[in-house]
Image (cartoon, grey):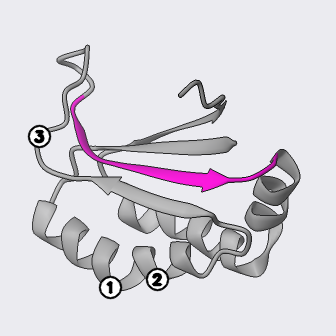
Amino acid sequence: MKRVIVNYGMPTDTAAFDKHYAEVHTPLTKAMPHLKSFEVSRGEVVSSSEDEKVYVTAILTYETQADLEASMASPEGQAAVEDLGTLATGGVTILTIETEELM
């Protein structure tokens, strides 16, 4: 599995972030092709660094690297990436990892 982990920093306006994330960004993300699952962690997110407060974490899962690349290259993927500039007023960190199921 390929996973994309998106950590959103503390936004300048949490209410505006929440509204935009629910009404604009979530539908854009859900429309991305090849997306196997889309999970979000809200509320108190624990970070190992006091300087890097995380407001929301999103986890996107794909079967393969090819699926991930096709999804990001699609018009829907490009629209979601472009929307980060509007949404992520507190900064954003994106990690791409490969996971192996052990149990």
Give yes or no for residue 63 being in the magenta stretch. Answer: yes
On screen, residue 97 above or below 2: above
Q: Secondary structure at mark 3?
A: loop
Q: How crowded is the residue under tag 3: few (<14 C-alpha within 10 Å), some, or many (20+)?
A: few
What segment is highlighted magenta in the picture? 53-64
Mark 3: amino acid: Glu
Q: Is residue 43 left or right of residue 29?
A: left
Q: Which residue is mark 3?
A: 44
Q: How crowded is the residue under tag 2: few (<14 C-alpha within 10 Å), some, or many (20+)?
A: few
Mark 2: amino acid: Pro
- Residues under numbered marks 2 and 3 in contact, where contact means CB atoms less than 8 Å apart: no
Name the residue nearer the viewer: 61 or 95: 61
Q: Is residue 71 left or right of residue 95?
A: right
| Residue drawn at (65%, 75%) of the image | 32
Q: From mark 2 to mark 3, how far is it between C-alphas?
A: 23 Å
Q: From mark 1 to mark 2, how far is it between C-alphas?
A: 7 Å
Q: Quadrant of residue 98?
A: top right
The numbered mark, 2 or 3, whose residue comes first in the sequence reads 2
Give yes or no for residue 73 being in the magenta stretch. Answer: no
Label number found at residue 27: 2
Mark 1: amino acid: Glu
Q: Which residue is mark 1?
A: 23
Q: Is residue 85 left or right of residue 43?
A: right
Q: Quadrant of residue 55?
A: top left
Q: Main secondary structure of the magenta part?
A: strand
| Residue drawn at (84%, 64%) of the image | 70
Q: Secondary structure at mark 1?
A: helix
